[in-house]
Amino acid sequence: GAGVSQTPSNKVTEKGKYVELRCDPISGHTALYWYRQSLGQGPEFLIYFQGTGAADDSGLPNDRFFAVRPEGSVSTLKIQRTERGDSAVYLCASSLYQGSDEQFFGPGTRLTVL
Amino acid sequence: AQSVTQPDIHITVSEGASLELRCNYSYGATPYLFWYVQSPGQGLQLLLKYFSGDTLVQGIKGFEAEFKRSQSSFNLRKPSVHWSDAAEYFCAVGFYSSASKIIFGSGTRLSIRP
């Protein structure tokens, strides 16, 4: 079956621009997670959705970052006024239920801010 | 604060030799524990997980891990490594108090010597 997909796989943008990163979870998974992985580091939690609502957005670094999941399936991570420090791989994961259930990760979107 | 420590940044072992990757966590109660593997250009794949019960956990690809509460450790082991095991390995911790969030260690890069 299809796994978690993320588009685009690579995104290059200029400082100050707006970007959107898309995540398509595994069909039927109710929970969706966004992580950010900087070079040489482990993934860092950003936000988690249960259904359509953001259940925990404590990892979003500042108000330039925002994520939505309007229909409880596909999610979009939005970054305004990008900065060079936003360059990283953005990972999306989904799980059947929240909590202890296994999270299945997508291949990530590599964002480069010039 | 909750944290995960992987003290070894890079380990090289000979093919066929045994492997142990170290992981320590900081948390006031019993956490959920995971080991993930990330190969170049690949997404994160779950190797094994511990939630409760038997403290020795078997995973995929011949890996196992042992939860030691007294040492706050969850070390990953494999009796005989294969060249295909070369990858980045991440220990991760989930918490009952925040059922969705997973905190990752910084990773250990495993190289295999022919």
Image: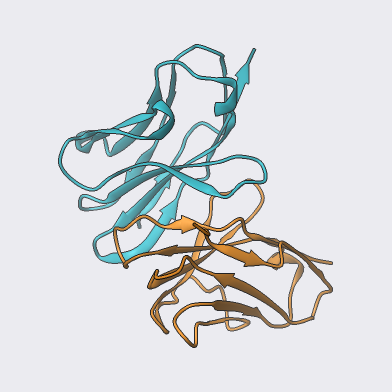
Chain colours: A orange, B cyan
Quadrant in which the C terminus of chain B is drawn: top right
Rendered location of residue A21, percent (x, y) = 65, 73
- How many numbered discs, if any? 0
Q: Nearer the viewer, residue B65 or B45?
A: B45
Residue displayed at 63% across by 80% down: A78
Q: Is residue B38 above or below residue A27?
A: above
State the residue at coordinates (54%, 77%).
A75
Q: Position of residue A72 (x, y in %)?
A: 44, 81
**Does residue B66 sit above or below A4 in this rendering?**
above
Residue shown at 40% from the left, 34% from the top: B60
Q: Is residue B96 left or right of residue B18?
A: left
Residue A7 location (% of width, % of height): 67, 68
Q: Is residue B85 placed above or below B105 in the rendered structure? A: above
> Residue A94 placed where, x, y %?
44, 64
Residue A10 lies in quadrant: bottom right
Instruction: Give the quadrant of the N terminus of chain B.
Output: bottom left
Q: Is residue A98 left or right of residue A77?
A: left
Residue at 40 percent across and 26 percent down: it is B62
Frontmost residue, A45 versus B28: A45
